[in-house]
């Protein structure tokens, strides 16, 4: 369902379409490719540290509503980035919430995901972490 907004600027009118479907972060097409490029080489079987499997067929179930093995937080608490260990691991704030280990993704030298990529994860969690 599209909602149209019309904003008057002088004599010009600008129409902008906004749709929840257009604005929603897609787990399959936006987040899983980040896992594939940055994380799967270490988190592919679930036997890794933390028992986290980020392979395409398993990643959502391994994250959403699943207890972290490194922190008292859930890996992803739908709607609550600040209570989601994944969010803290991606931002390097995991130790402040009782976590351990390194920020993710692992690299040498250490570096976080780009701010735009982290913003996608935050928006996805805030939207309820759908398997879309």
Image (cartoon, rainbow, N blue to C red):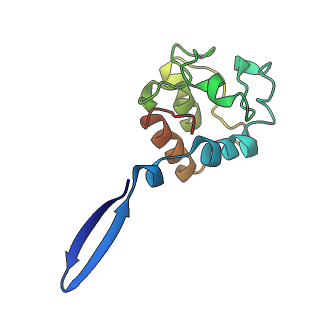
| Pick the front one: 104 or 79 | 79
Extreme residue toward the front, this view: 1
Q: Is residue 112 visible?
A: no
| Pick the front one: 110 or 2 | 2
Determine whether 54 is above or below 68 in the image: below
Percent coordinates x, y for residue 99 in the rendering: 57, 19
Please state, as top left, top right, bottom left or bottom right, where the C terminus lies in the image: top right
Query: Quarter of the image holding residue 36?
Result: top right
| Pick the front one: 127 or 80 | 127
Determine whether 101 is above or below 42 in the image: above
Q: What's the residue at 44%, 52% (across, down)?
A: 23
Percent coordinates x, y for residue 2 in the rendering: 36, 58
Extreme residue toward the bottom, this view: 11
Percent coordinates x, y for residue 115 in the rendering: 53, 50
| Pick the front one: 82 or 32 | 32
Q: What's the residue at 49%, 21% (across, down)?
A: 97
Query: Quarter of the image holding residue 13?
Result: bottom left
Q: Is residue 101 visible?
A: yes
Q: What's the residue at 71%, 27% (across, down)?
A: 58
Percent coordinates x, y for residue 91 in the rendering: 54, 37
Q: Looking at the image, how many numbered discs can be counted on the residues?
A: 0
């Amino acid at each position: 369902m599209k909602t149209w907004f019309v904003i008057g600027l002088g004599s010009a009118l600008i129409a902008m379409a906004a749709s929840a479907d257009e604005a929603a972060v897609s787990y399959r097409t936006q987040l899983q490719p980040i896992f594939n490029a940055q994380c799967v080489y270490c988190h592919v079987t679930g036997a890794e540290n933390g028992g986290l499997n980020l392979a395409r067929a398993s990643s959502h179930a391994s994250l959403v509503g699943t207890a972290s093995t490194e922190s008292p937080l859930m890996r992803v608490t739908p709607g609550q980035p600040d209570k989601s260990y994944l969010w803290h691991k991606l931002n390097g704030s995991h130790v402040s919430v009782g976590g351990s280990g390194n920020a993710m993704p692992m690299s040498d030298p250490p570096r976080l995901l780009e701010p735009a990529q982290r913003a996608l994860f935050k928006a996805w969690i805030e939207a309820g972490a759908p398997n879309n």
